Image: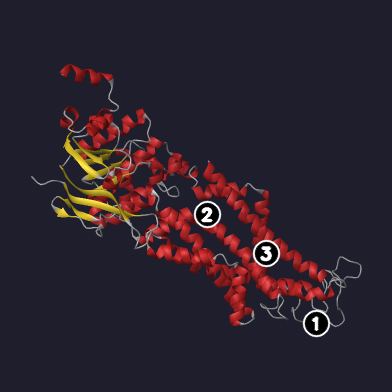
Amino acid sequence: MSHVLEVKGLSKTFRGRRDWPWSPRSVALEPTSFTLEAGETLAIMGETGSGKSTLAKLVAGVDNASSGDIYLNGQKLYDNNTKQRCQNIRMIFQDSEKSLNSQRTIGQQLEEPLLFNTSLSAAERDDYVKKILRKVGLLAEHYEFYPHMLSTGQKQRVAIARAIALEPQIIVADEALVALDPSVRAQIINLMLDLQQEMGISYIFVTHSPQIVKHIADKILILYRGKMIAFEKTELLLTEPQQPYVEQLLHEHLTTEHLNQKRQKR
Amino acid sequence: MAQPDLYYRDNNPSPLQLVWYSFRSRIAAMVALWFLIILLAVTLLSPLLAPFDPAQQFTDAISLPPSWTDAGNMQYMFGTDDLGRDMLSRLLIGSVYSFALPLATVIVASTFGIFMGAVAGVDRNFKYQVFGQVFDRVLTIPSFLLALVIIAILGPGLGNAIIAITLSLIPQFIYVTRNAVHSEWQKDYVTASRLNGCSNTYLMYRVILPNITPALVMQLTVALSVSIMDIAALSFLGLGVQPPTPEWGSMLSRSLDEVYLSPWSMVLPGITLFLTITAINVVGDSLRRAIKQRMEN
């Protein structure tokens, strides 16, 4: 069976703030390999600075990898082929507020991916954007709105609309749920799960919330200081964590209920 | 369906429009803006408005005071200078050299500067660092001194003064644009547009430009007042516009000799210069406040 996404030995080294050719490099991500199946949800976890955002950005194409390859349905993705990448892998950012251009209307921004990746006419794009807006639970009238007129939850919906506009196979969400309050977060998670069922999208979630991971993830990838230390099915990792670090990370916020369950098992 | 559409459009002012609404509510700003608009119109129409040739000498009316004094003559509304030239005509024609030319230098300098700054500001690479390091050093030299150095090489004259001022303004535009583009480039919305597959031209004009407009407009007003001051100062020193061309700075310089005999020949160009620069600064300052207010909301 071929994987939707196959990452082989992906690594990233950074130079310091000043990007001179002779500046020393530091390692953000050591060679990492993993695979992702269609309709599956992968959670990337780790401490701050463990390289989880770096990995997400490399997969989404924000940064170019220092080494390693990414294969999509067995096809190699090249750094300079942005079209191939953006039609299949889309990204949702941590802060929906910052990821929207404050000077342009929602409609104009949602039209952007269509303008550069499809051959739709202006009227067709218009209709399509309004259709997508309704799909994520907004109104066609939001087409004319500017980002500052929407609430945080609505902005996150716009960000999701932008991600699904090209009907991608994979969506990378970099801490996309952190800035939202619990009720809105639940709405957004449900929306994303609905879209996953409907469109068969694979998700890569970067998060540090064990509850969300438990709820949505099929597989978990754990990074520690740029190194991948675990890549397992969620149930397996939750019930039998091999390393103390993994256990700490996953059970840090678990409720007493889960702890009781664990005690009973013992 | 047409009705609700109209309703929504009416209620959706863009952020730039909001800045304009805020600007419009300031009386001083609007007065200054109208002053500049009228000044621009007068400048463009000055050959038609001027009652006399600015170089024409009336030997029967030398050093005539303005018309509102007892000794004045309505024929020469602002009086005449020590060679019997009509002050009003000289001020009107002078606006071409003192206001329109600086405006043109700013337009040329901003075109070059903004383009080069945009090229330099994109991404964090070697080009960005080199531009940054070089222009940080160049900007430590005041623009007027830079213009003087260029004049020293090229020699005095109107054309050379314009070249010198244009060249001395360019580094500031590069600096401001480079910094603005660079800080925007790192923001998520630009990354998002980049991931949409947008071309670089589209990114620059449609995505980044609307967001750096405030910084650019502010730099334009600053550059305009600096440019007017510089051309007046160069002419005052005799390095810019040469007599008998009626430039406000050179008129000031000439009136130094006879300031006790005919004070109006110094006061009138001085006041016009003062009002023009004040108006530009008030517009620039109000714009900055309007933008700040908009950002805070």
Q: Is residue B33 visible?
A: no
Near mark 1 (Cα within 10 A), the count class, few <14, some 14-19 or many ≥20, is some
- The kind of residue tagged 3 is Leu
Residue located beneath label 1 in the image: B57
Q: Is residue B276 left or right of residue A112?
A: right
Report x, y in % for residue A160. Answer: 31, 41
**Is A125 placed left or right of B231 in the picture?**
left
CA gap, disc 1 to disc 2?
Answer: 47 Å
Residue B265 sits in quarter: bottom right
In the picture, the disc for residue B39 is 3
Depth-wise, is mark 2 or mark 3 nearer the camera? 2
Q: Is residue B104 above or below residue B31?
A: below
Does B101 sit above or below residue A71?
below
SS category of the residue bearing label 1: loop
Of pointers 2 and 3, the one earlier in the residue sequence? 3
Question: Residue B3, image x and y in percent?
Answer: 45, 41
Q: Is residue B175 visible?
A: yes
Task: Check the residue under mark 2 and report the chain it is in.
Answer: B
Residue drawn at point x = 34 percent, y = 52 percent: A112
B62 in relation to B135, above or below = below
Q: Split into 4 quadrants, where in the image is the N terminus of chain B?
A: top left
Give the Cα distance between marks 3 and 1.
26 Å
* Disc sitting over residue B214 in the figure: 2
> What SS does tag 2 mark?
helix
Report in which chain the residue with disc 3 lies: B
User: Which is in the foreground here, disc 1 or disc 2?
Assistant: 2
Residue type beneath disc 1 = Gln
Residue beneath the point at 19% across and 54% down: A69
- For label 3, count other residues whose C-alpha is less than 10 Å away and answer few (under 14), some (14-19) or many (20+): some
User: Which residue is depicted at the point 75% across and 64% down?
Assistant: B271
